[in-house]
Amino acid sequence: MLSFLRRLRFSPAPIPDDLWHAAHARVPWLRALDSARDARLRELTARFVHEKTITPIGELALDDAQRVSLAALCCLPLLEFGADGLRGWSQLIVYPDAFRVNRTHVDAAGVLHEWEDELIGEAWESGPMILSWADIVADCEDPSAGFCVAAHEMAHKIDALDGELDGTPPLPRPWQREWARDFQAAYDKLARQVDRGRETVIDGYAAEAPEEFFAVVTEYHFSDPQTLRAEMPQVAAHLERFYGPSPFA
């Protein structure tokens, strides 16, 4: 029998009921959605599965239900933004666990530095998105812990849609100015706390760069909105407007 996912290569057919029910069982965020948003997410998920090649690496094998669950999780940040957030890339690479990448950097003195990073996710501006399956599973097992690597990397993809990875997604001009003002203020405050060695409530990785700040607070919007609202109320308000209410609000 021709599988559901192969049929989707020819047309974005609706997600079958059994696979959508399986996604609900695996992904806690789905179970928390109201019926209207659930239906919208189901349509986005069908589009994702149709348009993206999902490539497991090594010995990792993903069945249809796992692929649909993964696609649904990736589409959560697009509930308000819409399918336009899927443009510009075509492949989702899935490693069994954290993966290593080689980095290089030439400093101001012309010295080449090389090192290795261990990552659980990565999003190239005009290339694939990469995720660790083990961390996807961990996020779903503890969905209120402040982590959601799929939402983090999708935030980077949305951020890059306007041609600049800077922590500000495509927005109407007046809102863009308000967003930039409020996010910059919150980012600067967090960066000062990190620089002084203070313990922060929001993950200090958010102080790495404005684009990482946007991606990290996106994780909090979906997985721990109460903490984000308490620590950064203006940022939380922007994200609720951009993403819609968190399923766990």
Image (cartoon, helix red, strand yellow):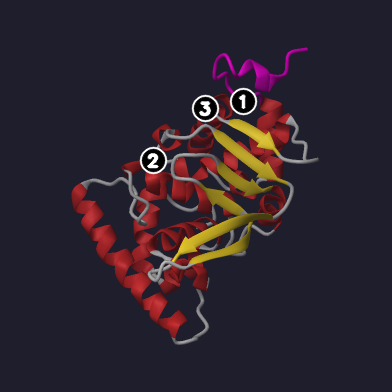
Image quadrant where residue 110 sits: bottom left
Label 3 sits on residue:
47
At horizontal 34% and vertical 74% (from top left) the residue drawn is 188
Q: Is residue 220 visible?
A: no
**Alpha carbon distance from label 1 to label 3:** 9 Å
- Look at the image and say whether residue 140 sits in the magenta stretch: no
Over which residues does the magenta segment extend? 1-16
Label 1 sits on residue:
15
The relative height of residue 73 versus residue 8 in the rendered view (above or below) is below
Q: Which kind of residue does numbered mark 3 sit on? A: Arg
**Alpha carbon distance from label 3 to label 2:** 14 Å
Label 2 sits on residue:
81
The relative height of residue 165 versus residue 195 in the rendered view (above or below) is above
| Neighbours of disc 3 within 10 Å: few (<14), some (14-19), many (20+) | many
Predominant SS of the magenta segment: loop
In the rendered image, the residue lying farthest to the right is 59
Asked if disc 1 and disc 3 are in contact, CB closer than 8 Å, the reply is no
Q: Position of residue 154 (x, y in %)?
A: 49, 46
At horizontal 62% and vertical 64% (from top left) the residue drawn is 145
At horizontal 50% and vertical 32% (from top left) the residue drawn is 44
Sequence-wise, which precedes: disc 1 or disc 3? 1
